[in-house]
Amino acid sequence: MARLFITPREIDFIADITKEITKDVIGDVIYYYKVREDVSQVHDVYEESPEKIFDPPVEIDARVQWNPKEVRTDRFGMEGVYTTEVYVHYRDMIDRGIKLEEGDYFSYGDNFFEITSIVYDKVIFGQVEHISGYTLKAKQARKGQIFKKPLGPTEEIYSDPEAIRDTFEQQRGDASKGDKRALVDQGKVDSATHVKQQVKKDNSSSSFYGDDT
């Protein structure tokens, strides 16, 4: 597509509309744990850190492809391993100053994953300087690699009050969550029209259905 027709304004619109889908419609998140290589002790022989130090977890809006568990059998018995692919918005990471790297970890549900590769999803209309997003390929972390309590919704069989997410509120450019919408900042879209809709377990107080009391 020629740059004559896809200008910076269109690029901003594409970034904003994909943020809207990810943050205001899908509402799925991962919790990202960055490994602190500067303070983690590395084994002299294996060049791995048996006890990794992590930065505090960061909540990242994402689209997650959930794959069934792969069951493998070898001479030691059976082993079930999850793998997953996660799409993360490229400009959102720039706006929030988050640098994703292979070897870092994230949690989704009650599982922890190690990022094995990070690839660009695609360029926007052939403009190589504008990337639509990252695809994170990850495998389930081996036992002992990370000792953290899973955050966010996990599974409804658990008694933890946060095991089920029964409230969802759109971000709509909420600065407290690091959400930035380019066209709003530039004054090309009225921020007053960005009314946050909310869905709660109690339908009588859900603004999404227009039946607030």
Image (spheres, rainbow, N blue to C red):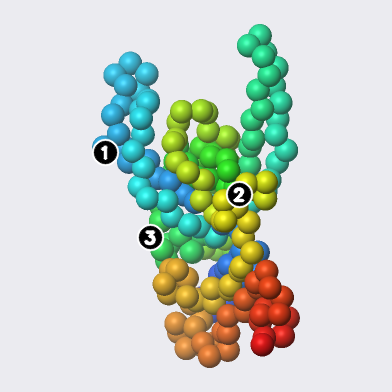
Q: Are marks 3 and 1 in contact (CB under 8 Å)?
A: no
Q: Secondary structure at mark 2?
A: loop
- Location of the C terminus by quadrant is bottom right
- Residue at 58% of width from left, 73% of height from top? 170
- Residue at 30% of width from left, 34% of height from top? 40
Going by the picture, which residue comes out furthest to the left?
Answer: 39
- Near mark 2 (Cα within 10 A), the count class, few <14, some 14-19 or many ≥20, is few
Q: Is residue 174 left or right of residue 46?
A: right
In depth, the one of 158 and 113 nearer the eye is: 158
**Marking on residue 159:** 2
* Amino acid at circle 1: Asp
Q: Is residue 36 left or right of residue 119?
A: left
| Labels 2, 1: front one | 2
Q: Secondary structure at mark 3?
A: loop
Q: Quadrant of residue 76?
A: top right
| Labels 2, 3: front one | 2
Q: CA distance from mark 2 to mark 1?
A: 38 Å
Q: CA distance from mark 3 to mark 1?
A: 19 Å
**Residue beneath disc 1:** 38
**Residue beneath disc 3:** 97
- Near mark 1 (Cα within 10 A), the count class, few <14, some 14-19 or many ≥20, is few
